[in-house]
Image (cartoon, rainbow, N blue to C red):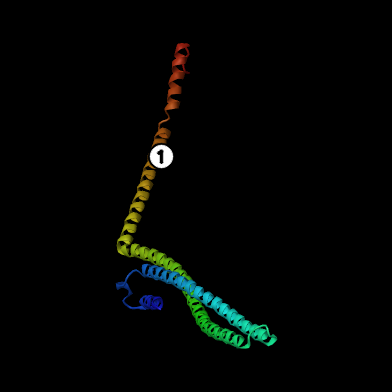
Amino acid sequence: MNIFKRLFKIGEAETHAAIDKMEDPIKLTEQGIRDMKKDLDKSLESLAQVKALAIRAKNDTEEYAAKANDYQQKAMLILKKAQNGDMDAANADRLAREALIKKEEASGQQTRSQEESEKFNESVSQLDKNIQEIKQNISKWENELKTLKARVKVSNATKNLNKQMAQIDGSSTVSMLERMKDKVNQEEALAEAYGDIANSSKSIDEELDKAVDTSKASADDDLAKLKEQLGMQDS
């Protein structure tokens, strides 16, 4: 069948070295499945038609068999009438002979119908086998299509990721990290320097305050002024 040739081409295309130059495998597979379904519809239509012919041939066979038996019975009844004296013997023989001729014609038609019925049944069997095979292939290729689509998604995702990774310059990245590290080191050193300056300034103020005890000198002056107001003099 043509559909199997197409499927073979699809399978061959998937393993061919020049697959990149061919059509999209997914679209090709989808088209193959659509073609198989069309063939399935045609096969189902043909099967229905042949089955109808087989049924008609079977009915004809039964009908001709019934006619042959009816003519046989009529010939026998006519001869019995002649035997019993109810009918002229010569006329009975003539009618019985005609009935037997009709019987032979019906038997011949019965045989031909039987042969046709057998041929139609063989065709029905073959068509049914083909239909089952097409159904199996449709199911197989639909599953293959699902797998293929999943593989394409994974392949595209992997390709995009690898592409992004390939676009990253390793040396520039390392250089950028080194610059960032230097910047951080510089900021940390600057912060430490400001801390040292702050601590140094604080220590100097403490030493100055300690060397010049302004609070004690002020207290002595206040005491002298108070004694002078009271008319007290130091001894």
Instruction: Give left or right: position of 114 versus 144.
Output: right
Q: How many marks?
A: 1
- Label 1: which residue? 203
Quadrant location, the N terminus:
bottom left
Name the one closer to the observer, 198 or 162. Answer: 162
Q: Alpha-carbon neighbours of circle 1 within 10 Å: few (<14), some, or many (≥20)?
A: few
Q: Position of residue 13 (x, y in %)?
A: 35, 76
* Above or below 120: residue 187: above
Give the residue type that dot 1 points to: Ser
Per the image, label 1 sits on a secondary structure element best described as: helix
Q: Position of residue 229 (x, y in %)?
A: 45, 11
> Image quarter for residue 91?
bottom right
Name the one closer to the observer, 142 or 49. Answer: 49
* Above or below 169: residue 10: below
Q: Position of residue 46 (x, y in %)?
A: 45, 73
> Image quarter for residue 162?
bottom left
Name the one closer to the observer, 31 or 204. Answer: 31
Q: Residue furthest right?
A: 84
Name the one closer to the observer, 58 or 102. Answer: 102
Q: Residue at x 38, y 65 (%)?
A: 156
Q: Position of residue 217 (x, y in %)?
A: 43, 25
Instruction: Give left or right: position of 83 versus 22.
Output: right
Q: Residue at x 53, y 75 (%)?
A: 55
* Above or below 67: residue 220: above
